[in-house]
Amino acid sequence: MRVWRIEGRLFLGDYRSGEQALSGQKHPVDDDGEPKPFAGVVSLCPMPLLSDETIEGPIEIDTEWLQVAIMDGGSGEGELEAALGVIRPFVKRRLQHGNVLIHCAAGMSRSVAVMAALLCDQGESVGGALKRISLAKARALHPFAGDPDDLVAPAWEFVACLNRLYSDFDAGRASE
Protein backbone atom coordinates (compact mmCIF):
# COMPACT_ATOMS: atom_id res chain seq x y z
CA MET A 1 0.00 0.00 0.00
CA ARG A 2 1.42 3.37 -0.98
CA VAL A 3 0.35 5.33 2.06
CA TRP A 4 2.22 7.83 4.21
CA ARG A 5 1.49 8.66 7.85
CA ILE A 6 1.57 12.44 8.05
CA GLU A 7 0.44 12.90 11.63
CA GLY A 8 -1.10 10.62 14.20
CA ARG A 9 -4.03 8.98 12.45
CA LEU A 10 -3.87 11.10 9.29
CA PHE A 11 -2.55 9.33 6.21
CA LEU A 12 -1.89 10.49 2.66
CA GLY A 13 -2.10 8.18 -0.33
CA ASP A 14 -2.49 7.65 -4.04
CA TYR A 15 -5.28 6.03 -6.06
CA ARG A 16 -4.14 2.47 -5.37
CA SER A 17 -4.03 3.10 -1.62
CA GLY A 18 -7.62 4.36 -1.84
CA GLU A 19 -8.69 1.17 -3.59
CA GLN A 20 -6.91 -0.94 -1.01
CA ALA A 21 -8.36 1.00 1.94
CA LEU A 22 -11.87 0.57 0.52
CA SER A 23 -11.22 -3.15 0.09
CA GLY A 24 -10.43 -3.55 3.79
CA GLN A 25 -6.64 -3.16 3.89
CA LYS A 26 -5.58 -2.77 7.52
CA HIS A 27 -3.09 -0.36 9.04
CA PRO A 28 -2.07 0.14 12.68
CA VAL A 29 -4.06 2.92 14.36
CA ASP A 30 -1.17 3.58 16.73
CA ASP A 31 2.52 2.95 16.03
CA ASP A 32 2.50 -0.18 18.19
CA GLY A 33 -1.17 -1.01 17.76
CA GLU A 34 -3.09 -3.76 16.05
CA PRO A 35 -3.82 -3.20 12.35
CA LYS A 36 -7.40 -2.12 11.65
CA PRO A 37 -9.30 -0.97 8.57
CA PHE A 38 -9.37 2.77 7.91
CA ALA A 39 -12.22 4.53 9.73
CA GLY A 40 -12.48 7.06 6.92
CA VAL A 41 -11.38 7.36 3.30
CA VAL A 42 -11.51 10.67 1.44
CA SER A 43 -11.26 10.23 -2.35
CA LEU A 44 -10.33 13.43 -4.18
CA CYS A 45 -10.27 11.82 -7.62
CA PRO A 46 -12.97 9.90 -9.48
CA MET A 47 -13.35 6.31 -8.30
CA PRO A 48 -12.80 4.31 -10.45
CA LEU A 49 -10.26 6.50 -12.16
CA LEU A 50 -9.57 4.87 -15.51
CA SER A 51 -11.86 1.91 -15.91
CA ASP A 52 -15.53 1.14 -16.36
CA GLU A 53 -15.53 -0.93 -13.16
CA THR A 54 -17.63 0.27 -10.29
CA ILE A 55 -16.53 0.66 -6.73
CA GLU A 56 -19.56 -0.04 -4.60
CA GLY A 57 -18.06 1.34 -1.42
CA PRO A 58 -16.00 0.15 1.51
CA ILE A 59 -16.04 -3.56 2.30
CA GLU A 60 -15.65 -2.92 6.04
CA ILE A 61 -18.81 -1.73 7.76
CA ASP A 62 -16.85 0.63 10.04
CA THR A 63 -15.17 2.42 7.12
CA GLU A 64 -16.91 5.54 5.87
CA TRP A 65 -16.13 6.86 2.39
CA LEU A 66 -16.33 10.48 1.30
CA GLN A 67 -16.00 11.18 -2.43
CA VAL A 68 -15.16 14.78 -3.30
CA ALA A 69 -13.60 14.73 -6.75
CA ILE A 70 -11.76 17.99 -7.41
CA MET A 71 -9.65 18.79 -10.44
CA ASP A 72 -6.04 19.92 -10.63
CA GLY A 73 -6.00 23.25 -12.44
CA GLY A 74 -8.97 25.08 -13.85
CA SER A 75 -11.25 26.23 -11.05
CA GLY A 76 -9.15 24.40 -8.46
CA GLU A 77 -9.05 27.26 -5.95
CA GLY A 78 -12.84 27.46 -5.61
CA GLU A 79 -13.23 23.70 -5.71
CA LEU A 80 -10.67 23.21 -2.95
CA GLU A 81 -12.29 25.75 -0.66
CA ALA A 82 -15.75 24.21 -1.15
CA ALA A 83 -14.36 20.70 -0.66
CA LEU A 84 -12.69 21.67 2.62
CA GLY A 85 -16.08 22.66 4.02
CA VAL A 86 -17.19 19.04 3.64
CA ILE A 87 -13.89 17.29 4.31
CA ARG A 88 -12.94 18.96 7.60
CA PRO A 89 -15.97 17.77 9.63
CA PHE A 90 -15.80 14.30 8.06
CA VAL A 91 -12.13 13.89 8.99
CA LYS A 92 -12.65 15.23 12.50
CA ARG A 93 -15.52 12.81 13.09
CA ARG A 94 -13.79 9.75 11.63
CA LEU A 95 -10.48 10.38 13.47
CA GLN A 96 -12.39 9.62 16.68
CA HIS A 97 -12.79 6.06 15.39
CA GLY A 98 -9.38 5.39 13.81
CA ASN A 99 -7.19 6.21 10.86
CA VAL A 100 -8.26 8.45 7.99
CA LEU A 101 -6.78 8.22 4.49
CA ILE A 102 -6.87 11.21 2.18
CA HIS A 103 -5.94 10.25 -1.35
CA CYS A 104 -5.97 11.46 -4.94
CA ALA A 105 -4.57 9.90 -8.09
CA ALA A 106 -0.85 10.37 -7.35
CA GLY A 107 -0.80 11.61 -3.74
CA MET A 108 1.04 14.76 -4.77
CA SER A 109 -1.38 17.65 -5.39
CA ARG A 110 -5.04 17.44 -4.32
CA SER A 111 -4.48 15.23 -1.29
CA VAL A 112 -1.40 17.24 -0.30
CA ALA A 113 -3.42 20.48 -0.44
CA VAL A 114 -6.19 19.01 1.73
CA MET A 115 -3.68 17.57 4.18
CA ALA A 116 -1.92 20.95 4.35
CA ALA A 117 -5.25 22.63 5.15
CA LEU A 118 -5.86 20.15 7.98
CA LEU A 119 -2.41 20.89 9.40
CA CYS A 120 -3.02 24.64 9.02
CA ASP A 121 -6.25 24.22 11.00
CA GLN A 122 -3.98 23.05 13.84
CA GLY A 123 -1.85 26.22 13.62
CA GLU A 124 0.77 25.21 11.05
CA SER A 125 1.73 27.74 8.36
CA VAL A 126 1.11 26.76 4.73
CA GLY A 127 4.83 26.52 4.03
CA GLY A 128 5.39 24.57 7.24
CA ALA A 129 2.54 22.17 6.44
CA LEU A 130 3.85 21.47 2.94
CA LYS A 131 7.36 20.91 4.32
CA ARG A 132 6.02 18.59 7.00
CA ILE A 133 4.18 16.52 4.38
CA SER A 134 7.22 16.29 2.10
CA LEU A 135 9.48 15.23 4.99
CA ALA A 136 6.97 12.59 6.15
CA LYS A 137 6.85 11.12 2.65
CA ALA A 138 10.67 11.16 2.39
CA ARG A 139 11.03 9.40 5.77
CA ALA A 140 8.57 6.71 4.66
CA LEU A 141 10.54 6.16 1.45
CA HIS A 142 13.79 5.70 3.39
CA PRO A 143 16.35 5.61 2.02
CA PHE A 144 15.40 8.62 -0.12
CA ALA A 145 18.26 10.48 -1.76
CA GLY A 146 16.30 13.19 -3.57
CA ASP A 147 14.86 16.52 -2.51
CA PRO A 148 11.81 15.91 -0.26
CA ASP A 149 10.09 18.92 -1.84
CA ASP A 150 9.91 16.92 -5.08
CA LEU A 151 7.44 14.56 -3.35
CA VAL A 152 4.70 17.19 -3.18
CA ALA A 153 3.40 19.26 -6.07
CA PRO A 154 0.13 20.99 -5.21
CA ALA A 155 -1.36 22.94 -8.12
CA TRP A 156 -0.72 26.66 -7.88
CA GLU A 157 -4.46 27.27 -7.48
CA PHE A 158 -4.50 25.11 -4.35
CA VAL A 159 -1.50 26.92 -2.88
CA ALA A 160 -3.17 30.27 -3.66
CA CYS A 161 -6.32 29.10 -1.88
CA LEU A 162 -4.35 27.89 1.15
CA ASN A 163 -2.43 31.17 1.31
CA ARG A 164 -5.68 33.14 1.15
CA LEU A 165 -7.40 31.00 3.78
CA TYR A 166 -4.48 30.87 6.17
CA SER A 167 -2.85 34.26 5.46
CA ASP A 168 0.54 32.73 4.82
CA PHE A 169 2.40 34.55 2.11
CA ASP A 170 5.65 32.68 2.65
CA ALA A 171 4.85 29.22 1.31
CA GLY A 172 8.41 28.79 0.09
CA ARG A 173 9.03 26.62 -2.91
CA ALA A 174 5.39 25.51 -3.26
CA SER A 175 4.33 29.03 -4.31
CA GLU A 176 7.01 29.45 -6.97
Image (tube, helix red, strand yellow):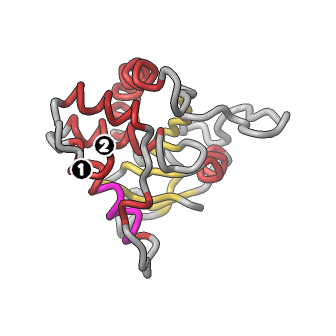
State yes or no: residue 39 in magenta: no
Disc 2 to disc 1, C-alpha distance: 6 Å
Please identify the quadrant where the N terminus is shown: bottom right
Circle 2: is it few (<14), some (14-19), or many (20+) Cα within 10 Å?
A: some
Q: Position of residue 109 (x, y in %)?
A: 47, 43
- Location of residue 5 with respect to 51 vertically, above or below: below
- Residue found at x 29% / y 32%: 162
Q: What residue lies at 42% left-to-right and 48% top-to-bottom?
A: 99
**Spot occupied by residue 26 in the image (x, y as percentages of width and height):** 56, 57
Q: Foreground: 93 or 104?
A: 104
User: What is the secondary structure assignment of the residue under circle 1?
Assistant: helix
- The picture places residue 46, in percent across and down from the top left corner, at 66, 32
Q: Quadrant of residue 5?
A: bottom left
Extreme-front residue of the structure: 176
Which label is found at residue 78? none
The part of the image, by quadrant, that contains residue 30 is bottom left
Residue drawn at x 38%, y 39% as measured from the top left = 113
Kindly identify which residue carries mark 1. Answer: 172
- Left or right: residue 154 versus residue 46 is left
Which residue shows up at 53% across the image and 26% down it? 68
| Mark 1: amino acid | Gly
The answer to whether the residues at label 2 and label 1 have Cβ atoms under 8 Å apart is yes
Q: Nearer the viewer, residue 90 or 170?
A: 170
Mark 2 — residue? 175
Q: Main secondary structure of the magenta part?
A: helix
Q: What residue range appears in magenta?
A: 132-139
* Crowd around label 1: few <14 · some 14–19 · many ≥20 (10 Å): few
Q: Secondary structure at mark 2?
A: helix
Q: Is residue 21 left or right of residue 97?
A: right
| Mark 2 residue type | Ser
* Percent coordinates x, y for residue 116 in the rendering: 31, 42
Horizontal arrangement in the rendering, residue 119 relative to residue 113 (left or right): left
